[in-house]
Amino acid sequence: MRDTPWLRKSEPLVISAGAIAVALALFGLFCAIAGANPFGVYGSIYTAAFGSSSRIQGTLILASPLMLSALCTALPARLGLVIIGNEGALVVGGVGAVAMGLSLGTSLPPLLVQTLMAIAGMVAGGVWIGIVGALRHYRAVNETISSLLMNYIAIALLNHLVGGPMRDPSSLNKPSTFPLAAANMLGNLPGTRIHYGLIFGLVACGVAYVLIQRTTFGFAARTAGGNVRAARIAGLPVGRLAVTICFLAGACAGLAGMVEVAAVHGVANESLNAGYGYGGILVAFVARHNPLAAALIAVLVGGIVGSGGILQRTHSLPDATVLIFQGIMFLTILYSDSLYGKLAFFREQPVDIPPDPTPAAVETTV
Amino acid sequence: MASEALGWLGVPLAIAAGTMRGGTPFLFVSLGECLTEKSGKINLGLEGTLLTGAMSAYAVSYLTRDSLGPMLAPFAGVLVAGLAGMVLGFIHGWLCQQPRVNDVAVGIAMIIFGSGVAFFFGKPFIQPSAPLLPTIDLLAWTDLPEQFQSAVKISPLFVLGVAIAPLMTWFFRSTRWGLFIRAVGDSPDAALAMGVSIFKVRMLSIVAGSFLAGIGGASLSLYYPGVWTELVSSGQGLMAVALVIFARWQPMQCLWASLLFGGAQALGPALQSVGITQGYYLFNAAPYVLTLVIMVITCSPTRTMTGVPGALGSDR
C-alpha cells in the first residue's frame, strides 16, 4: 500500500487552486465577450489589489472587515448551521459601538472608550446572531431564513435610528449619527494607513482557529455539527453550544461594524451596509469555513472588491464586473466540492489482497 | 399621491392599491419558489433572478420600442425576463444537484452572480425610460375622482399571477407531473422506485420556477415601481423564500401571503402621506418582522411543519 499522507493533504489545495483557475478562465471568457482584453483585466485587478505598497494597504483595509464578517458564517458552519446574517450583525455592531462612543464622549481615556466601544459592538452583534441560534434550537426556526430576515430588520433599524432618534441635524444628504470624538477613533499601524482593524481581524481568525480545532469546546461543536443525535447521546449541551457559537459568530461581525465606524466612517450611516456581509459569506465558503484560510481569502477578495474603480477607468467595464467575478468564483468553488474523491490521482491505492467472495454473495441475496 | 387629497380616507385606498402593485412581484417569485421547493430544493438565488428579470425586461422593452411599438415591446420584455430567469435557473438546477453541493450556498452564489449580471448589463438602461406595461382601467367609464381611478388600475401581470395560483394548485393535486414533483420532493426513494428521474424533475421545477421569478422581475421594472435601478428589488426575492414557508407550500396560500406582504409594504408610504413620518423605516421592516414572528409561532422543535416537502433541506 502506498503511504502518501502528503497526497491526501494536497487534494483540497489542488482542487481549490484549480477551482480558482477555472473561475479566472470563465471570467476571462466573459470579459472577452464583453469586449475587453482578459489579460489586461487580470493585470488591472492585480495592479489594483497588490500593485504597490499603497495599493496593498488599501486591500488590507478592505480585507479586515471581510475577515471578521466571514467568521460569522464560518463558525456556525462547523456546527452545521448556515448563517447569512453577517450584514445585520455588522450593522447593529456598528450602531452599538457608536451609541457607546457617543454616550461616553471624552469623559474616559480614549483606550478605555475604544475597548468599551468594541465590547458594545461585539455584544450587539453577538446578541443579534445569538437570537438566531436560540430560535434555531428552541423553536426549530430555520437559521438561514431567520438570519436573512434579521439582516433586513437591522438595516431598517439603522435607517430608523440615523433618520430620527440618533440623527445629527447637520447631516443633510446622508442622514448620520453625530460623529465620534476624534480622540476615540482607532489609529493606524505605525508607518501605514492601515487601521488597527486588521489586527482585530487576524487575532479573531487565529483565536477562532484555536477555539475550533484545539479546544474541547471546539471539539464538542464539531461533534454536534457532525451528528447531533450522537452528540446528544454523548451528553453534549447541544443547545448551549449552538447559542454560544452563534453569539461568538455575531460578535465577530459586530466587531467588524465597530471597526468600520471607529476607524473608517467616524459615524454610523448607510455606508455600514456596504456589502461586507455578503462578501464575508463568500470568503467563508471559499475558505471552507477554516478561520485561518478565511484570513488569506479575505485579502484576495478584498483585492478583487477594491479593483472595481480601475476596471471602470481603464477598460470601461461597469463596476459590477467585480460582482460577476465574485459570483463565478463562488460557483466554481462550490462545484469543486463535488470533485473530492473523484480524481483518480488522489485516490488511495487499493490494498492488494485477493477479493473476498462474501460481498458478491450478499449482493445476490439483496 | 392619491391619499393626499383624500386625507385619512386615502390610507385604506392607498393600501389596497399598494397591495396589488406591491404584491405582484411577491406573487410570481413565491409561486416560482413554491414550485422549486415542492421538488425538494431551495433556490435562494431568486433574488438574483428577480434583478436579472427586471433588468432584461426593461432593456428589451426599451430596445424594441420602435420595432415592436410601445404596446408590444413591454410584453416582449416580460417574455425575455422569463427566459433570462430560466438560464439562471438552469445553472442553479445543475449545480445544486452535484454531490456534496449545498443548495443554500449555491443560492447565495447565484444572488451575487445574478445581481452582477443585472448590474453589468443594466448600467446603460438606468437613465432612459422604456415603455411600461399597459394597465386595465376598471373605472375608466365612470366619472369618479382621479384618485379612485389610479387606485384600481390593474396590471395584466397581476391578473396572470392570480390565475396561475389556482392553476398550480390543480397541477400539484390532479396531474401526473404534479405527482412526480411531489414524489421527488417528499420521498426521492419512492420517486426513484416509480422510475422518475429525480435530476430531470428537479431541474424542470427549478427552471420553471425561475421563469416565474424572472416575470416577477419584469413586473418590478415594467409595472411598479416601473423603473430599473439597482435597488429595485430590495430583497423581495429573498423574502419570497420566507413567504413560501409562511404559505405552507400551497400556491393559493402564496397568493394571500403575497397580497399581505404587498399590503404591509404599502403601509409605510401610505401613513407617511398623511403626515405620520415617525417610524417610516420601521414600517418598512414590518413584512420581515411579521415573517419572523410567524415562523417563531408556527415552528416547533418536536414536530415537522405541516406541508413541508420531506426532502427539503436534506442531502437527498
Image (spheres, coloured by chain):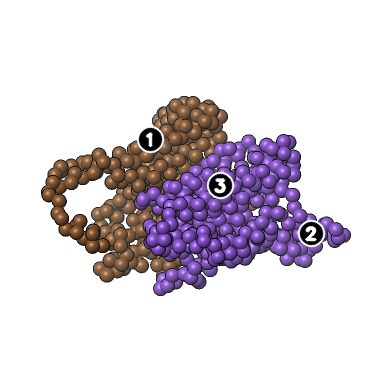
Question: Which type of secondary structure does the marked residue at label 2 adopt?
Answer: loop
Q: Is residue A306 above or below residue B166?
A: above
**Mark 2 surroundings within 10 Å by alpha-carbon count, few (fewer than 14), some (14 through 19), many (20 or more):** few
Mark 1: which amino acid?
A: Ala
Kindly identify the residue that appears in the image at 43 percent across and 47 percent down: B95
Quick check: can you spot residue A104?
no
Chain B hue? purple
Quarter of the rendering occupied by the N terminus of chain A? top left
Seen as rendered, the residue at the extreme bottom is B302
Disc 1 to disc 2: CB gap under 8 Å: no
Task: Say which chain tag 1 marks.
Answer: A
CA–CA distance in space, label 3 to label 1: 27 Å
CA–CA distance in space, label 2 to label 3: 31 Å
The location of residue B138, given as percent across then percent down, is 79, 59
Which numbered disc, 2 or 3, marks the residue that appears first in the sequence? 3
Q: Which residue is mark 3?
A: B85
Q: Which residue is mark 1?
A: A21
The location of residue A233, given as percent across then percent down, is 27, 70
The image quarter in which residue A63 lies: top left
**Mark 3 surroundings within 10 Å by alpha-carbon count, few (fewer than 14), some (14 through 19), many (20 or more):** many
Between A158 and B173, which is closer to the camera in this rendering?
B173
Seen as rendered, the residue at the extreme left is A353
Q: Is residue B181 above or below residue A234?
A: above
Q: Which residue is mark 2?
A: B138
**Labels 3, 1: front one:** 3
Mark 2: which amino acid?
A: Leu
Kindly identify the residue that appears in the image at 40 percent across and 73 percent down: B302
Between B42 and A215, which is closer to the camera in this rendering?
B42
Between A270 and A45, which is closer to the camera in this rendering?
A45
